Amino acid sequence: MSAEGRIQLLRNGAQAARTSAVVTTMLALVKAGVGFLSGSIALLGDAVHSFADVSASVAVWLGLKLSQRRPSERFPYGFYKVETFTLLLVSLFVAVAGGEILLESLRRVMSPSPVAFVSVTLSVAALSSVVSLLLFRYKLQIGRMTNSQALLGEAKHSLTDVWSSALVFIGILAQYVGLAPAESIAGLLIGVLIIWLGVGMGRDAVLVLLDACLKPELISQMRNITNEVDGVKGVHDIKVRRSGPFIFGEMHVELDSAMSVEKAARISDTIEDNIRRSIQQLDSLLVRTEPSKKDVYRIAIPVVHDGGLSSKVSEHFGKSPYFIFIDLHEGNPVSWFVVENPAVSLDKKRGIEAAHLLARHKADALVTREVGEGPYHVLRDSSVHVLALNRKSEIRQVLDAFSRRALRGLVPVNKQA
């Protein structure tokens, strides 16, 4: 994602936080006024909760505004974690508000008092629940689009507002029909719910600030994408960390030891491009390349028939009916399998199709008598070493020469074999 795209996402998130703050402020003022006049502790508590929401929304908006500042020499990774820090502040505001509601409701349980203007109070509680539901859906949509952790946290908070306002409605209605402590009990439940949400939000914010990996599935996703790139022999030490709404990652990729620097750079670029297309919130990815350390080395040999290690070696490449793939560990064969060459029936480009066959079966080396320039370059681009078979040999003689490193590199001929 470009820098301009990231800035636009942050602007969208800031706009959503600002809109939420304005609407919630108006709603909190209405609930506070009606709660004070009616004497409803549950509605007053819900108003306190809404004022906490306003403070949280303002904090998120300020955090997203600061996050839009471009990286500097002093802050090379940008200001994205300001948004996460504001989420931590949000969690503190929420927990404090929940504690206040809890204590005041507990006192009212001991000495309940009737609620005045019941119809008006019930209407305000119902209105608050509906508006909070609309705010939840709005912030959830923008939060997912911008991948703003704080805005998604605020959306969850708005969903809590829906239930808390519904509890206020039920509590007031139950008190009106004769259950005197019902409204205060509703306040107790609201306080507990708010404290629980605040603790959860604070925990997530602290984990992000400590660079914890909150989504292990991203590591598996990045590993699968990397292993699908041609030329990659292995990948390990994948690390991801979140900074505000964006992700920073690094990985170690194993490539063939004989691969050129230019080819290694192209593979690194391909890996980064593929991962960026799959993980939109990725800000940067550091790909460290290193020589492959293989315990098992796979060689391919053209053979005339499917006879396992007793197969007769073919003097042709593209015209060979079969290829035997042998996995070697410390020079000794540990397993093998024979694959039919579908290119035999072709009139043209038999060698190139055979080369693609070897690449698909992850061969590390090919031992053959001769190979054309086209197939040779396909094999080299797939990091398959091409070694020369100088005379007629049996499979075990080829393996012995290979383990003694007695096979030299093959020079392609000016025709496709």
Image (tube, helix red, strand yellow):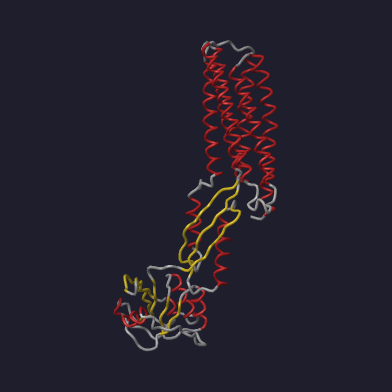
Q: In the image, is 29 to the left or to the right of 103?
A: right
Foreground residue, 145 or 151?
151
Q: How many marks?
A: 0
Specify the quadrant that holds the N terminus.
Answer: bottom right
Foreground residue, 303 or 26?
26
The residue that appears at 54% across and 74% down in the rendered structure is: 260
Residue 58 x, y percent position in the rendering: 67, 35
Residue 393 x, y percent position in the rendering: 34, 86
Q: In the image, is 62 to the left or to the right of 255?
A: right
- In this rendering, the answer to whether 365 lies above or below 52 is below
* Among the 4 quarters of the image, the one containing residue 135: top right
Q: Residue furthest front?
A: 74
Q: Residue furthest bottom?
A: 391
- In this rendering, the answer to whether 412 lies above or below 230 is below
Q: Tell me if residue 255 can be seen.
A: yes
Residue 62 x, y percent position in the rendering: 68, 39
Q: Tell me if residue 145 can be seen.
A: no
The residue that appears at 31% across and 80% down in the rendered structure is: 396
* Among the 4 quarters of the image, the one containing residue 191: top right
* Among the 4 quarters of the image, the one containing residue 19: top right
